[in-house]
Amino acid sequence: MHVLVAEDDRDIADLIGHYVRKAGWAPHIEATGDGALAYARHSPVDLAILDVMLPGLSGLDVCRALRADTATSHLPIIIVTARAEESDRIAGLDIGADDYIAKPFSPNELVARIRALVRR
Protein backbone atom coordinates (compact mmCIF):
# COMPACT_ATOMS: atom_id res chain seq x y z
CA MET A 1 0.00 0.00 0.00
CA HIS A 2 1.25 3.45 -0.95
CA VAL A 3 0.57 6.22 1.63
CA LEU A 4 0.90 9.92 0.83
CA VAL A 5 1.96 11.96 3.88
CA ALA A 6 1.54 15.73 3.51
CA GLU A 7 3.28 17.27 6.53
CA ASP A 8 5.60 20.29 6.62
CA ASP A 9 7.08 19.53 10.06
CA ARG A 10 9.95 17.23 9.15
CA ASP A 11 10.08 15.51 12.55
CA ILE A 12 6.38 14.63 12.44
CA ALA A 13 6.62 13.60 8.77
CA ASP A 14 9.56 11.31 9.58
CA LEU A 15 7.70 9.84 12.57
CA ILE A 16 4.60 9.10 10.48
CA GLY A 17 6.79 7.70 7.69
CA HIS A 18 8.58 5.42 10.15
CA TYR A 19 5.33 3.97 11.53
CA VAL A 20 3.84 3.59 8.04
CA ARG A 21 6.95 1.66 6.94
CA LYS A 22 6.89 -0.40 10.16
CA ALA A 23 3.29 -1.41 9.33
CA GLY A 24 4.48 -2.68 5.95
CA TRP A 25 3.38 0.21 3.76
CA ALA A 26 5.33 2.60 1.53
CA PRO A 27 5.16 6.28 2.57
CA HIS A 28 5.76 9.22 0.27
CA ILE A 29 6.29 12.53 2.08
CA GLU A 30 5.41 15.93 0.64
CA ALA A 31 6.02 19.17 2.57
CA THR A 32 3.53 21.37 0.68
CA GLY A 33 -0.12 21.13 -0.23
CA ASP A 34 0.64 21.84 -3.89
CA GLY A 35 3.21 19.03 -3.96
CA ALA A 36 0.83 16.60 -2.27
CA LEU A 37 -1.98 17.34 -4.71
CA ALA A 38 0.30 17.02 -7.74
CA TYR A 39 1.72 13.74 -6.42
CA ALA A 40 -1.72 12.25 -5.73
CA ARG A 41 -2.89 13.18 -9.22
CA HIS A 42 0.09 11.59 -10.97
CA SER A 43 1.07 8.62 -8.79
CA PRO A 44 -0.89 5.67 -7.47
CA VAL A 45 -1.82 6.43 -3.86
CA ASP A 46 -3.93 4.18 -1.63
CA LEU A 47 -4.43 6.62 1.27
CA ALA A 48 -3.55 10.23 2.10
CA ILE A 49 -2.62 11.74 5.46
CA LEU A 50 -2.94 15.52 5.28
CA ASP A 51 -1.84 18.15 7.77
CA VAL A 52 -4.18 21.16 7.68
CA MET A 53 -1.53 23.87 7.99
CA LEU A 54 0.60 23.29 4.88
CA PRO A 55 2.52 25.83 2.81
CA GLY A 56 0.73 26.63 -0.44
CA LEU A 57 -2.59 24.82 -0.48
CA SER A 58 -3.90 23.86 2.96
CA GLY A 59 -4.66 20.24 3.74
CA LEU A 60 -8.36 21.13 3.60
CA ASP A 61 -7.90 22.57 0.09
CA VAL A 62 -6.03 19.43 -0.96
CA CYS A 63 -8.82 17.28 0.47
CA ARG A 64 -11.45 19.30 -1.44
CA ALA A 65 -9.48 19.03 -4.68
CA LEU A 66 -8.97 15.27 -4.28
CA ARG A 67 -12.70 14.75 -3.65
CA ALA A 68 -13.61 16.86 -6.71
CA ASP A 69 -11.41 14.82 -9.08
CA THR A 70 -13.01 11.56 -10.26
CA ALA A 71 -9.58 9.87 -10.34
CA THR A 72 -8.99 10.51 -6.62
CA SER A 73 -12.51 10.98 -5.23
CA HIS A 74 -12.43 7.49 -3.66
CA LEU A 75 -9.09 8.01 -1.89
CA PRO A 76 -9.26 7.48 1.90
CA ILE A 77 -8.11 10.68 3.63
CA ILE A 78 -7.04 11.26 7.22
CA ILE A 79 -6.60 14.84 8.43
CA VAL A 80 -3.87 15.27 11.06
CA THR A 81 -3.65 18.67 12.69
CA ALA A 82 -2.99 20.69 15.81
CA ARG A 83 -6.39 22.32 15.33
CA ALA A 84 -8.56 20.16 17.56
CA GLU A 85 -11.63 22.33 18.11
CA GLU A 86 -14.96 20.66 17.38
CA SER A 87 -15.66 23.15 14.57
CA ASP A 88 -12.32 22.27 12.90
CA ARG A 89 -13.09 18.53 13.10
CA ILE A 90 -16.56 19.07 11.67
CA ALA A 91 -15.18 21.22 8.83
CA GLY A 92 -12.59 18.57 7.95
CA LEU A 93 -15.15 15.79 7.92
CA ASP A 94 -17.70 17.89 6.03
CA ILE A 95 -15.31 18.59 3.15
CA GLY A 96 -14.67 14.88 2.68
CA ALA A 97 -12.04 13.62 5.10
CA ASP A 98 -12.69 10.06 6.28
CA ASP A 99 -11.05 10.60 9.66
CA TYR A 100 -9.57 13.42 11.73
CA ILE A 101 -6.84 13.03 14.35
CA ALA A 102 -5.52 15.83 16.56
CA LYS A 103 -1.87 16.44 17.42
CA PRO A 104 -0.26 15.27 19.55
CA PHE A 105 -1.33 11.78 18.58
CA SER A 106 -0.17 8.23 19.10
CA PRO A 107 1.53 6.89 15.95
CA ASN A 108 0.09 3.47 16.82
CA GLU A 109 -3.41 4.98 16.88
CA LEU A 110 -2.77 6.54 13.47
CA VAL A 111 -1.73 3.14 12.08
CA ALA A 112 -4.86 1.58 13.60
CA ARG A 113 -7.01 4.25 11.94
CA ILE A 114 -5.27 3.59 8.60
CA ARG A 115 -5.99 -0.12 8.96
CA ALA A 116 -9.66 0.63 9.75
CA LEU A 117 -10.03 2.80 6.65
CA VAL A 118 -8.34 0.24 4.41
CA ARG A 119 -10.73 -2.46 5.68
CA ARG A 120 -13.71 -0.42 4.46
Image: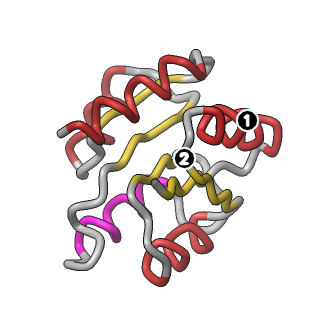
Secondary-structure class at tag 2:
loop
Find the residue positioned furthest to the front: 24
Name the residue located 77 percent from the left edge and 41 percent from the top edge. Answer: 14
Marker count (numbered): 2
Tell me the residue that label 2 is attached to. Answer: 25
Left or right for 7, reference 94: right
Residue 115: image location, x then y, percent: 36, 32
Name the residue located 71 percent from the left edge and 59 percent from the top edge. Answer: 31
The colour scheme of the drawn protein is secondary structure
Residue 115 magenta-highlighted: no
Residue 108 appears in view: yes
> Magenta residues, as a range?
59-68
Q: In which quadrant of the rendered view does residue 112 lie?
A: top left
Prevailing secondary structure class for the magenta stretch in the rendered image: helix
Residue 27: image location, x then y, percent: 61, 53
Which one is in front, 118 or 89? 118
Residue 77: image location, x then y, percent: 36, 48
Find the residue positioned furthest to the right: 11
Cα distance between the residues tagged 1 and 2:
17 Å
Cβ atoms at labels 1 and 2 below 8 Å apart: no
Which one is in front, 112 or 51? 112
Tell me the residue that label 1 is attached to. Answer: 12
Q: Is residue 10 above or below residue 22?
A: below
Secondary-structure class at tag 1:
helix
Residue 56: image location, x then y, percent: 62, 68
Nearest to N terminus: mark 1 or mark 2: 1
| Mark nearer the viewer, 1 or 2 | 2
Assign the N terminus to one quadrant of the image.
bottom left
Q: Residues within 10 Å of mark 1 (few under 14, many from 20)?
A: some
Left or right for 72, reference 13: left
